Image (tube, coloured by chain):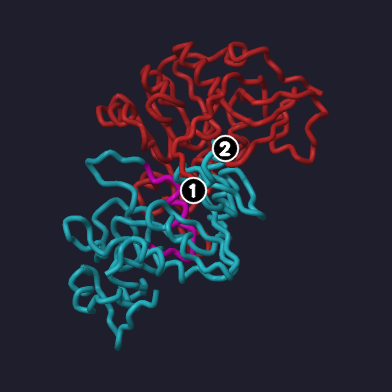
Amino acid sequence: MLDKEGIAKRIAKEVKDGYYVNLGIGIPTLVANFVRDDIEVEFQSENGILGMGPFPFEGEEDADLINAGKQTITALPGASFFDSAMSFGMIRGQHVDLTILGAMEVAENGDIANWKIPGKMVKGMGGAMDLVASAENIIVAMMHTNKAGDSKLLKKCSLPLTGVACVTKIVTNLAVIEVTKNGFKLLERAPGVSVEEIEKATEGKLLVEGDIPEMQL
Amino acid sequence: MIRKTVANVEDALQGVEDGMTFMLGGFGLSGIPENAISELVCLNVKNLTCISNNAGVDDFGLGLLLQKKQIDKMVSSYVGENDEFERQMLSDELDVELIPQGTLAARCQAAQQGFPAMYTPAGYGTEVSQFKETREFDGKMYVLEKAFKADFAFVKAWKGDKAGNLIFKGTARNFNPLMCGAAKITVVEVEELVEPGELDPNQIHIPGIFVQRIFEGKNYEKRIEKRTVRKK
């Protein structure tokens, strides 16, 4: 079974040379730490930067330089700044190659819910609805089950949707899963996790074809 | 050169009244119009509608207006990090319209550029598109979203000249340029106000035509919401 860092590590392998990538808050943010350094990748933050770098050194923080999680960051050589309309223009216009975000629920048709729990304080969708409505390549990073032990990979989302039929891949603490027309297709198992365990933790339709390899991290 | 300067924040906010709709630039606390917000607190105008990506924190930014119950309605994409906001929202004292961030940006830009509305895929199939017109283009569904209408836009830029030409800095740019000219009156505060000719016209982000009033702000706190650093 993977921890959050393990999930980020596995997702980092999906980041290819020449990709512009948008990382959501939480596990997705960790992905940047594990991307191979022999490929060219730029991270976009939707508040207006391409070429986002690591956190600044102590004493070098700049209130005018933050990411979408409002954390202080740095800009790498070759970075650019732009306004929010242009930022979502590059998202909506499908110029960003890969979007990685967290979720509360994903349905077997690719619907995603990650912004609202009725009856609880709602903080808002931020840029998530724009991202999932536009991106062609959306990977969800999340735990396979919630704190109560219930599956987050469902036949149908129970929470208010963020976007419809949009998720392409899911990486959880248990598995790598592709969203297909026919349901969740199991691609890889986390180290030490059996197909049966994954089946048990998946409420939606899980397609298991042949031998399922263990993840290489 | 058409001069856009006003002497101070008091002059810049002339005409602000109860019940108005304001646009306020900024993402989190980055690039917020600190001087205009302080003056709105002083003026104690009430029953405001505020269009702003976020709602500040409890004791800074728009949180200051919320503390004094000056805001009736917020139009935002994300409103975490603010206890008083949460209290007012859950007790129905505050009306909150949450909209996707890209839609917020586009509705500002539409107002600036004379588009009555535009189609976006964001929110299709979710509660955001309820009661809105939807339409298919090339096999994909879109939601019709309307341009904002506002009385004042309060914008923060890094540098500006007396003709109202503006340059923004870093990610403090965010929604600020999109709100210029998107309301009846655009009020810009800058950290540094210079003479016309001092800014390179090639480097201007927003031309002065979109700006009615500009002044040099004072006492910028530029608070950092989440200080994240690494060791040397």
Q: Is residue B116 visible?
A: no
Crowdedness of circle 1 by 10 Å Cα count: few (<14), some, many (20+)?
Answer: few
Name the residue nearer the viewer: B62 or B74. Answer: B62
Crowdedness of circle 2 by 10 Å Cα count: few (<14), some, many (20+)?
Answer: many
Q: Colour of chain A?
A: cyan
Question: Which kind of residue does numbered mark 1 sit on?
Answer: Arg
- Residue B77 sits inside the magenta stretch: no
In which quadrant of the rendered view does residue A177 lie? Answer: bottom left
Disc assigned to residue A128: none
Q: Percent x, y for residue B165?
A: 73, 30
Marks 1/2 in contact by CB < 8 Å: the verdict is no
Name the residue nearer the viewer: B138 or B155. Answer: B155
Q: Residue at x 57, y 46 (%)?
A: A48
Q: Which residue in the protein does label 2 denote? A: A64
Name the residue nearer the viewer: A80 or A206. Answer: A80
Q: Which residue in the protein does label 1 denote? A: B230
Q: Residue at x 54, y 50 (%)?
A: A88
Total marks placed = 2
| Cα separation between marks 1 and 2 | 18 Å
Q: Nearer the viewer, mark 1 or mark 2?
A: 1
Q: Which residue range is magenta in the image?
A: A124-140
Q: Is residue B161 above or below residue A113?
A: above
Chain hosting mark 2: A
Chain hosting mark 1: B
Q: Colour of chain B?
A: red
Q: Percent x, y for residue A1?
A: 27, 70
Q: Is residue A159 visible?
A: yes
In which quadrant of the rendered view does residue A193 lie? Answer: bottom left
Q: Percent x, y for residue B191?
A: 64, 26
Question: Which kind of residue does numbered mark 2 sit on?
Answer: Asp
Name the residue nearer the viewer: B106 or A36. Answer: A36
